[in-house]
Image: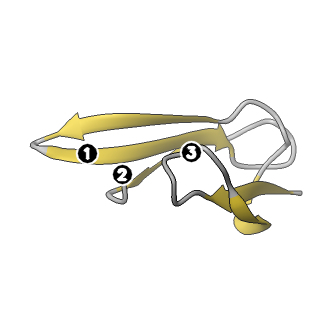
Amino acid sequence: PARLVARSTDGGISFHDARHHESLNDAGCNAGFARYRHRGRDLLLFTNAASTRRENLTIRASADA
């Protein structure tokens, strides 16, 4: 299975365009987001078990924060 993702254009009040993100393989449990400031830039961190068997903890970083 893949993680379900959606977009928000109003700061998280509402979400739309929900879909399964095929590159985010996931066991369907315990994922997390955090914003991290590094050298003056905000990064968005995403953690999850990058497999369908709850193994291989992965952290992804994006400058789209």
- Judged from the image, the secondary structure of the residue bearing numbered disc 2 is loop
Considering only vertical position in the picture, is 31 above or below 52? Answer: above
Give the alpha-carbon distance from disc 1 to disc 2, as whole Å.
6 Å
| Residue 59 as seen in the image, left or right of residue 31 | left
- Judged from the image, the secondary structure of the residue bearing numbered disc 3 is loop
Q: Of callouts 2 and 3, which one flags the residue occurring earlier in the amino acid sequence?
A: 3
Looking at the rendered structure, the kind of residue marked 2 is Ala
Residue lying farthest top?
30
For label 3, the residue is: 12
Residue 57 seen in the current view: no
Give the alpha-carbon distance from disc 1 to disc 3, as whole Å.
18 Å
The quadrant holding residue 4 is bottom right
The colour scheme used to paint the residues is: secondary structure
- Residue 5 location, x and y as percent? 70, 57
Q: Residues within 10 Å of mark 1 (few under 14, many from 20)?
A: some
Q: Residue at 44% x, 42% y: name it.
A: 45
Q: Residues within 10 Å of mark 3 (few under 14, many from 20)?
A: few
Looking at the rendered structure, the kind of residue marked 1 is Asp
Which is closer to the viewer, label 1 or label 3? Answer: 3
- Judged from the image, the secondary structure of the residue bearing numbered disc 1 is strand
Q: Which mark is residue 65?
A: 2
- Residue 52 location, x and y as percent? 86, 48
For label 1, the residue is: 42
Residues marked 1 and 2 touching at CB (< 8 Å): yes
Q: Residue at 70% x, 48% y: name it.
A: 50
Looking at the rendered structure, the kind of residue marked 3 is Gly
